[in-house]
Amino acid sequence: MTKRIRLNGTSRELAQGSSIAMLVRSLVGEEQEGVAVAVNGEIVTRSQWPEREVHDGDDIEIVRAVQGG
């Protein structure tokens, strides 16, 4: 069974039981420095990622800080 979310403005399906940590890992891999997550407009701290389950209809923004010069 799947659930539908919006990820960075794009509709996406995820498996039931998916967590924020699983989603971030699938997008950016293990190197997660500088990554920030908001769910439905609220910041989710990194310590909450493993237990924060993704729910059907969630609007999730995942951003990665980059530096340049």
Image: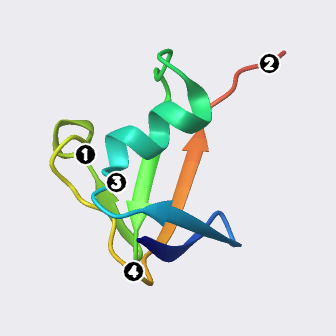
From this viewpoint, which residue is outermost toward the right? 69
Which numbered disc, 2 or 1, marks the residue closer to the eye?
1
Instruction: Identify the image quadrant of the N terminus.
Output: bottom left
Q: Relative to 20, does residue 25 appear above or below in the rendering?
A: above
**Closer to the eye: label 3 or 1:** 3
Residue 57 image offset from top left, x and y in percent: 44, 84
Work out whether mark 2 precedes mark 1 in sequence or the reverse, and give the earlier one.
1
Residue at the disc numbered 3:
18
The CA span between labels 2 and 4 is 36 Å
Of 44 and 68, which appears nearest the observer? 44
Q: Is residue 55 above or below residue 24?
A: below
Instruction: Give the alpha-carbon distance from disc 2 to disc 1, as whole Å.
Output: 25 Å
Q: Work out how far the residue at label 3 is from the one at label 1, CA to CA, in angstroms.
A: 17 Å
Q: Which callout, 3 or 1, points at the residue further toward the start of the chain?
A: 3
Q: Quadrant of residue 54?
A: bottom left
Tell me the amino acid under the disc marked 2.
Gly
The amino acid type, in three-letter code, at marker 1 is Thr
Which residue does the image show at 21% across and 40% down from the upper left? 50
Tag 1 residue? 45
